[in-house]
Image (cartoon, rainbow, N blue to C red):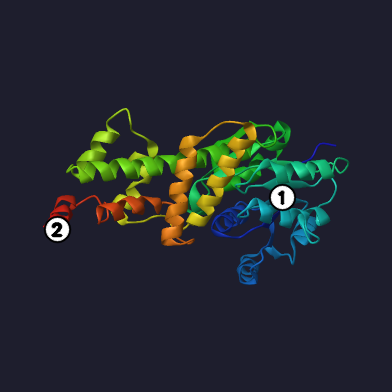
């Protein structure tokens, strides 16, 4: 019997990303069963009309289809395989969608342990930060069976941009694509900070330098768009902590080691991020490595008033 698109969804993990995602599922008309280790968050959802579950197992049992959005693979493993975990409650032929930034090992283990239960497993990590989650405009990268991806597309479209919900391949491909996106984005940040710091130190106006780079073959989406939050507002994106960024970088370099590809540049970027974490603390924003280069200059790099700020430092 062909499975239908579910109308009732369990959701485990109500942090900065899960908060926006669940609210958009409610707006789209899905019945929601939620669980999180923080009880105060559950009270908020009860007021919104969601059913509150006392455990991940209860959420899975009640909904039959459950999404996880959790910080680390270790926590995903605990939430799925623990005594009160998803597998303990999920019915046969139920569905588990992991939207965490993670690695294939946990999901692979679930498939190995449940060969006769008919459980559908998809990895579907996201890109777009907390603002994208709140707006329902996430990009979603899905690994798994194509027929199941299409069956669940209305669920994904409630949380993401329909034009950027991509089936990227078999099980594990979603995890891999997301890790590579993060790795390249973090590399863009470090390279951009380094180049801007050198140019400003050499006496070039920050705005002129950035305009020249944007107009050149060296332009990137990060240089043209993402870095503006720092250059105009001093916003290093505390919505995503640098501790989590370091976790993601570690996962991506581990994946490279697993598949046997040397990643010297990525390894250096990871160390820059770990130095920033040691300098500014675990809760600093994911773009805080930029500040390492500003500290070398002795002042922030900001558009507008750049020449005046430079004169104040050199006077």
Location of mark 2 (residue): 312
Residue 162 falls in which quadrant of the image? top right
Q: Is residue 240 visible?
A: no
Residue at horizontal 14 percent and vertical 55 percent from the top: 314
Q: Is residue 210 left or right of residue 45?
A: left
Q: Is residue 60 left or right of residue 270?
A: right
x, y (%) of residue 39? Answer: 65, 71
Compare residues 285 and 93 and report the one nearer the observer: 285
Foreground: disc 1 or disc 2: 2
Residue at horizontal 63 percent and vertical 55 percent from the top: 70
Tell me if mark 2 has few (under 14), some (14-19) or many (20+) residues whose alpha carbon lies within 10 angstroms of its own.
few
Numbered tag placed on residue 181 in the rendering: none
Q: Is residue 96 visible?
A: yes
Helix, strand or loop status at disc 2: helix
Location of mark 1 (residue): 7
Tell me if mark 1 has few (under 14), some (14-19) or many (20+) residues whose alpha carbon lies within 10 angstroms of its own.
some
Helix, strand or loop status at disc 1: loop
Q: Is residue 260 left or right of residue 93?
A: left
Residue at horizontal 62 percent and vertical 69 percent from the top: 47
Residue 86 falls in which quadrant of the image? bottom right
Q: Residue furthest top?
A: 217
Residue at horizontal 56 percent and vertical 40 percent from the top: 253
């Amino acid at each position: 019997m062909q499975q239908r698109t579910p109308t009732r969804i369990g959701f485990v993990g109500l942090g900065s990303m899960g908060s926006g995602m669940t609210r958009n599922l409610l707006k789209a008309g899905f019945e929601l069963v939620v669980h999180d280790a923080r009880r105060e968050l559950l009270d908020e959802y009860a007021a919104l009309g969601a059913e509150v579950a006392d455990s991940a197992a209860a959420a899975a049992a009640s909904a039959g289809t459950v999404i996880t959005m959790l910080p680390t693979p270790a926590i995903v493993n605990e939430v799925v395989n623990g005594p009160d975990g998803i597998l303990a409650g999920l019915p046969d032929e139920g569905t588990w969608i992991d939207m965490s930034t993670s690695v294939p090992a946990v999901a692979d283990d679930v498939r190995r342990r449940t060969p006769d239960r008919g459980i559908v497993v998809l990895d579907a990590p996201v890109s777009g930060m907390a603002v994208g989650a709140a707006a329902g405009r996430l990009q979603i990268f899905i690994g798994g069976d194509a027929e199941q991806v299409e069956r669940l597309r209305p669920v994904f479209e409630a949380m993401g941009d329909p034009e950027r919900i991509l089936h990227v391949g078999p099980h594990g491909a979603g995890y891999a694509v997301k890790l590579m996106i993060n790795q390249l984005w973090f590399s863009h940040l470090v390279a951009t900070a380094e180049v801007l710091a050198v140019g400003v130190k050499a006496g070039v106006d920050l705005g002129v330098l950035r305009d020249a780079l944007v107009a050149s073959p060296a332009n990137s989406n990060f240089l043209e768009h993402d870095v503006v939050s720092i250059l105009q507002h001093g916003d290093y994106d505390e919505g995503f902590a640098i501790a989590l960024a370091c976790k993601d970088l570690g996962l991506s370099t581990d994946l490279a080691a697993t598949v046997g590809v040397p990643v010297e540049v990525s390894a250096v970027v990871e160390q820059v991020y770990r130095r920033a974490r040691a300098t500014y603390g675990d809760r600093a924003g994911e773009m805080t490595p930029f500040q390492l280069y500003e500290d070398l200059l002795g002042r922030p790099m900001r558009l507008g008033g750049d020449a005046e700020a430079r004169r104040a430092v050199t006077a």
